[in-house]
């Protein structure tokens, strides 16, 4: 089973199936109910948070010929054509590879003609911020006077790169990272449908490492299923997940932070040497350190901020984090995070990643 299969196989087919993004769903379904459809939308937010999925659902809903004027019926010709990626009147463009003025001129030309079999012709332009300035200007002309039968949905991970003139002509929706409970709930549903026996703690580890991105979580689950499914259908454990995905146990980050707190440079370097010799991934480890250090920073700023991370730690780990945060000032933790982020950047490009982290340890302990 390809790890790509899961998120495609279980892509929501109705608004009610979408995890998170309630604010977006509520506004769009209200507009559908009242018949107030805009001709241009901007879906802005991190990757893997449902922008393209909701764009396709909106295309379905506005063209659905079923009785319900809000949820797609998934039975009419328009709905089934979109579900099966055969819809003539849904045009999806990746601006990362089709970013020039010629491509936008072609879109403008196609927008002029009435839909073949639907009420609206819907254009979804993914990674819209990558359009050239000339392409943006060409698109702007269409957005200023859009044909009555055309709807444009621009999706972007970098809305700040969009031209202000474009932003002024679209309805903007900001997508958020998904909460831990939302991701776990969806993973449970997928595991049940796939008839996979997996520990809830294992699903939690996947959700934590997805860092708010549903697509990443589903891809990781697919990878785990592909590597873990055996003839005897053994239960997938948290250890299986960590081994397959190369996930670093947060407890290792906690132990390492203790060494930094006590300025035990020698022990910290020996810790890293042992870590590397056991085949662990330094990139994963440094990412884990950064994420954990952020938790310490929040607690250090104000203990009430611990509520932002309580879902990500066990009660024992949270208590340990509170004690560790007292060993540093907020400024010291900020410096550690800054050094580690710089270290991560270097490790990804270095022929000597271990040395980069050792230098970071020395730098931290000299502060």
Image: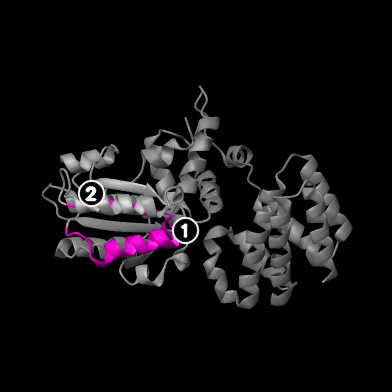
Residue that label 2 marks: 60
Residue 231, given in percent of the width and then of the height, sits at: 50, 22
Q: Is residue 134 magenta?
A: yes
Q: Which quadrant of the view contains residue 21?
A: bottom left
Residue 7 lies left or right of residue 31; in this view the side is right
Quadrant containing the C terminus in the rendered view: bottom right
Residue 209 higher or lower than 166, as above or below:
above
Secondary structure of the residue carrying tag 2 is: helix
Q: Which residues are magenta?
A: 120-148
Residue that label 1 marks: 46
Residue 154, given in percent of the width and then of the height, sits at: 35, 58
Q: Residue at x 18, y 45 (%)?
A: 73
Disc 2 crowd, CA 10 A, few/some/many (<14, 14-19, 20+): many
Residue 212 higher or lower than 308, as above or below:
above
Asked whether residue 42 is in view, the answer is no
Residue 24, given in percent of the width and then of the height, sits at: 32, 63
Secondary structure of the residue carrying tag 1 is: loop
């Amino acid at each position: 089973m390809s790890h790509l299969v899961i998120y495609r196989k279980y892509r929501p087919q109705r608004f009610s199936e979408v995890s998170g993004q309630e604010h977006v769903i509520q506004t769009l379904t209200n507009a559908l109910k009242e018949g107030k459809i805009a001709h241009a939308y901007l879906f802005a937010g991190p990757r893997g948070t449902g922008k393209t999925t909701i764009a396709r659902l909106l295309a379905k809903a506005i063209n659905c010929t079923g009785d319900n004027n809000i949820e797609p019926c998934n039975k009419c010709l328009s709905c089934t054509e979109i579900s099966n990626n055969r819809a003539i009147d849904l045009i999806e463009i990746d601006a990362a590879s089709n970013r020039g003025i010629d491509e936008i001129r072609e879109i403008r030309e196609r927008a002029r003609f009435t839909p073949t079999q639907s009420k609206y012709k819907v254009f979804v332009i993914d990674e819209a911020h990558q359009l050239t300035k000339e392409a943006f200007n060409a698109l702007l002309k269409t957005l200023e006077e859009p044909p009555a039968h055309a709807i444009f949905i621009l999706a972007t991970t970098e809305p700040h790169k969009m031209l202000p003139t474009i932003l002024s002509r679209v309805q903007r929706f900001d997508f958020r990272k998904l909460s831990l409970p939302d991701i776990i709930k969806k993973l449970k549903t997928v595991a049940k449908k796939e008839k996979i026996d997996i520990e809830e703690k294992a699903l939690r580890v996947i959700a934590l490492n997805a860092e708010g991105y549903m697509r990443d979580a589903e891809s990781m689950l697919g990878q785990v299923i592909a590597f873990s499914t055996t003839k005897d259908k053994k239960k997938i454990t948290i250890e299986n997940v960590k081994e397959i995905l190369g996930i670093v146990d947060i407890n290792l980050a906690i132990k390492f932070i203790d060494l930094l707190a006590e300025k035990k440079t020698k022990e910290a370097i020996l810790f890293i040497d042992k870590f590397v010799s056991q085949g662990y991934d330094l990139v994963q480890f440094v990412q884990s350190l950064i994420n954990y250090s952020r938790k310490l920073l929040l607690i250090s700023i104000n203990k009430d901020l611990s509520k932002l991370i309580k879902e990500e730690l066990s009660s024992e780990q949270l208590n340990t984090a509170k004690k560790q945060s007292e060993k540093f000032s907020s400024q010291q933790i900020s410096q550690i995070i800054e050094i580690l982020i710089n270290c991560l950047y270097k490790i990804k490009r270095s022929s000597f990643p271990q040395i980069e982290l050792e230098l970071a340890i020395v730098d931290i302990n000299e502060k």
